[in-house]
C-alpha cells in the first residue's frame, strides 16, 4: 500500500490541475489593451486590481464581489500597496503630473493626495511613517521617510536611478541603492552610517561617497558580485532573488541556484530539466512566489513549480500556459494571476491543500 501511495504521488506531482473560481470580466476595449500595463495586490480580505481600463478595482477575496472602483487615469505594472485600511496607488492628475493617492480600502474614498509622484519599490511602515523609494518632484529619485499623518516628507536622500532598486529594510538600518551596483547604509532618521569609505566611488549622487559594491544581498548579509553572477548566469538583469533565514535563492532564465552561508553554492538546478515544459512555454516573466522550510514555490515559463530544496525533488507543477500570466501571486492555497490573453484577473484553487502537500513531502522523505 505504501508503494502504491508513492507511485500515485510521483505521478500526480508532475503536472496538476486547478479550478478557476474568479474571473474579473471587465469590458476592455482594444485601445485599453494596446499598451498592456496591469498589476494587483492582495490583503486579508480584498484583491486590488489596477486594470488596463485605468481603474483600480477592489474585489472581495472570498465572494468575488466588486466592492468599489476608483478611476486613476493611470495603469502600471507596479502593484497597489496596502497597509491596514489604506491603499496607495498612482493617479494621473494632468499632463506630466502623477501623484500617489491614499485610499480607504473599505470604501474606496480618497483619504489624501501625497506630495510625492510615485512609490517605486515595496515600502515598510512604522505606525504613521512610510519608508520607501520614490519620486519627489523637488529632488527626483529618493529614499525617504514619509509622515502619513502630517502628509509630508520627514527626510529624503537623493539616489537618482537607484530609486528602482528595492532597499533592504533591516531592524536598525536601511540599505539603499545609489545607482548601479553601489549600496549605502543609513538609519531610520536618514543619517548616513558609513563614513570610513572602505570602498569609495564618484557618483552622480554626489553626497554619497562611502558605498558597498554588489548586485544583490544574501540571507547572511553577503554581497553577490557582478562577476559571480556573470560566471554562473551570464545575463542576470532579470534575475529573481529571495531568501529565508538559511538560504538565498536565485532564479534565472534556466537556472535555480541555492546559496548557503558565505556564498557557498548548495545546489545548481537546470529548471528546464527538472520540469516538463508546456508546449507554449514562451513567457519571459518569472517570479519566486513563496519560500517555506523545505519548499520553494516559483513561476517559470508558464509553470508554477513546487520544489523540495532539501531533498532536491519536484513536488508538483501546474501548467498555466492557457492564461499566459502577466503577474502571479500565491495566496495560501489560491493562485491569482493577470492573463495577457485578455487583461483579466483570475483566481485559481490549487488542487492540494497545505495539509495534503505536507503528506506528499513526508512520503517523499521515507
Image (cartoon, rainbow, N blue to C red):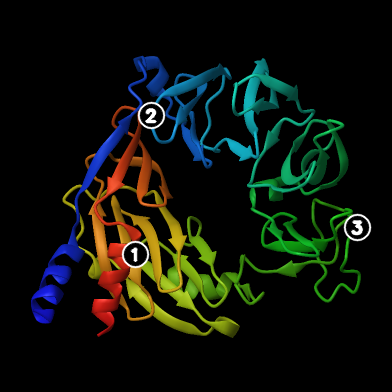
The image quadrant where one finds the C terminus is bottom left
First reached walking from the N terminus: tag 3 or tag 1: 3
Identify the mark nearer the N-term, 2 or 3.
Answer: 2
Q: Residues under labels 2 and 3: Cα distance?
A: 46 Å
Q: Residues within 10 Å of mark 3 (few under 14, many from 20)?
A: few
- Residue 198, quarter of the rendered image: bottom right
Residue of label 2: 64
Q: Nearer the viewer, residue 227 or 174?
A: 174
Q: Are marks 2 and 3 in contact (CB under 8 Å)?
A: no
Q: Nearer the viewer, residue 164 or 81?
A: 81
Q: Quadrant of the N terminus?
A: bottom left
Which residue has dot 3 on it?
191
Could you tell whether 273 is left or right of 72 in the image? Answer: left
The disc label shown at residue 254, or none: 1
Residue 4: x, y in percent? 8, 76
Is the residue marked by circle 1 packed among few (<14), some (14-19), or many (20+) residues within 10 Å?
few
**Observer-nearest of 309 and 254:** 309
Q: Quadrant of residue 139?
A: top right
Q: Confirm whether residue 314 shows in the render.
A: no
**Crowding near the residue tagged with mark 2, few <14, some 14–19, many ≥20 C-alpha atoms within 10 Å:** some
- Could you tell me how far apart the alpha carbons at marks 2 and 1 are, in whole angstroms? 36 Å
Amino acid at each position: 500500500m505504501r508503494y502504491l501511495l508513492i507511485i500515485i504521488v510521483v505521478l500526480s506531482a508532475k503536472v496538476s490541475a486547478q479550478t478557476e473560481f474568479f474571473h474579473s470580466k471587465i469590458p476592455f476595449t482594444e485601445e485599453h489593451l494596446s499598451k498592456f500595463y496591469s498589476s494587483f495586490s492582495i490583503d486579508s480580505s480584498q484583491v486590488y486590481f489596477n486594470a488596463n481600463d485605468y481603474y483600480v478595482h477592489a474585489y472581495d477575496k472570498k465572494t468575488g464581489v466588486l466592492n468599489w472602483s476608483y478611476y486613476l487615469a493611470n495603469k502600471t505594472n507596479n502593484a497597489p500597496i496596502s497597509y491596514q485600511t489604506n491603499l496607495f496607488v498612482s493617479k494621473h492628475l494632468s499632463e506630466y503630473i502623477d501623484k500617489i493617492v491614499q485610499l480607504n480600502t473599505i470604501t474606496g474614498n480618497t483619504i489624501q493626495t501625497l506630495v510625492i509622484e510615485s512609490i517605486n519599490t515595496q515600502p515598510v511602515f512604522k505606525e504613521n511613517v512610510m519608508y520607501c523609494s520614490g519620486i519627489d518632484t523637488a529632488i527626483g529619485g529618493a529614499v525617504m521617510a514619509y509622515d502619513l499623518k502630517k502628509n509630508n516628507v520627514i527626510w529624503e536622500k537623493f539616489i537618482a536611478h537607484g530609486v528602482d532598486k528595492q532597499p533592504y529594510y533591516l531592524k536598525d538600518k536601511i540599505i539603499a541603492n545609489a545607482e548601479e551596483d553601489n549600496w549605502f547604509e543609513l538609519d531610520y532618521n536618514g543619517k548616513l552610517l558609513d563614513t570610513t569609505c572602505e570602498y569609495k566611488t564618484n557618483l552622480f549622487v554626489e553626497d554619497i561617497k562611502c558605498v558597498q559594491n554588489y548586485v544583490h544581498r544574501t540571507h547572511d548579509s553577503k554581497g553577490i558580485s557582478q562577476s559571480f553572477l556573470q560566471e554562473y548566469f551570464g545575463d542576470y538583469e532579470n534575475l529573481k532573488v529571495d531568501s529565508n533565514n538559511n538560504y538565498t535563492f536565485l532564479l534565472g532564465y534556466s537556472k535555480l541556484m541555492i546559496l548557503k552561508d558565505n556564498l557557498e553554492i548548495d545546489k545548481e538546478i537546470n529548471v528546464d530539466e527538472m520540469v516538463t515544459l508546456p508546449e507554449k512555454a514562451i513567457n519571459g516573466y518569472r517570479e519566486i512566489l513563496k519560500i517555506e522550510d523545505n519548499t520553494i514555490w516559483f513561476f517559470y515559463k508558464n509553470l508554477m513549480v513546487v520544489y523540495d530544496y532539501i531533498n532536491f525533488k519536484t513536488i508538483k507543477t501546474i501548467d498555466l500556459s492557457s492564461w499566459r500570466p502577466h503577474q502571479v501571486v500565491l495566496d495560501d492555497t489560491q493562485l491569482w494571476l493577470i492573463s495577457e490573453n485578455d487583461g483579466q484577473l483570475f483566481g485559481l484553487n490549487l488542487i492540494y491543500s497545505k495539509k495534503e502537500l505536507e503528506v506528499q513531502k513526508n512520503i517523499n522523505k521515507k
